[in-house]
Amino acid sequence: AALAEAIAQQRERSFRTYGYRRMWLLAMKQQKKAVAAELQLHSDQGFQYTSRAYFNLTKSYGITPSMSRRGNPYDNAMAENFFSILKTECIYRHKPAAFSEANEMMDRYILFYNH
């Protein structure tokens, strides 16, 4: 019902000129925006990540905390794999001397990794 309503609204905004192809493209763009808008921060169940203060802090930034189930490291496997690669291919190879340098290196590497 929500999708039908969104399509009807977009149809009116386009003065009823958009056909199914453009409507599909718009729906895909909106879906990508909705997915990108929901940031998740994956962690283990360490005490610092299970505290109420940490939960409130992540929520204040619009981030949804996510953690592995107890005794199940595979819940976080994708994030763990990425951070392993980041450390091996970026941090350990170049050994930054300062936090600002490490921050800049990681930004460049993440851009490289994603594109």
Image (cartoon, helix red, strand yellow):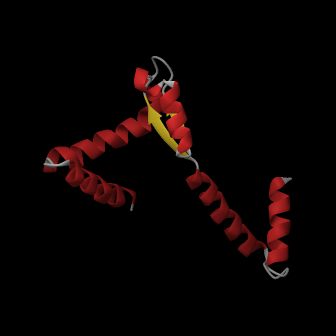
Nearer to me, 30 or 20: 30
Question: Is 5 left, or right, of 31 in this rendering?
Answer: right
The residue closer to the viewer here, 28 or 109, is: 109
Position of 48 relative to 35 (above/below): above
Q: Is residue 42 left or right of residue 92?
A: right
Check the picture and name the quadrant holding the C terminus.
Answer: bottom left
Q: Quadrant of residue 7?
A: bottom right
Residue 48 in view of the camera: yes
Q: Is residue 29 above or below residue 64?
A: below
Residue 4 versus residue 76 in the image, above or below:
below
> Where is residue 86 drawn, in percent x and y?
29, 46
Residue at 45% across, 17% down: 71
Residue 42: x %, y % from top left: 46, 36
Asked whether the viewer can see residue 46, the reply is no
Give coordinates of residue 97: x percent, y percent.
13, 48
Q: Is residue 64 left or right of residue 81?
A: right
Front residue of 107/81: it is 107
The picture places residue 81, in percent across and down from the top left corner, at 36, 38
Total marks in image: 0
Residue that appears at 48% across and 24% down:
50
- Choose top left, top right, bottom left or bottom right for residue 31: bottom right
- The residue most toward the top is 71
* Viewer-side residue, 60 vs 36: 60
Residue displayed at 42% across by 34% down? 77
Q: Residue at x 61, y 59 (%)?
A: 33
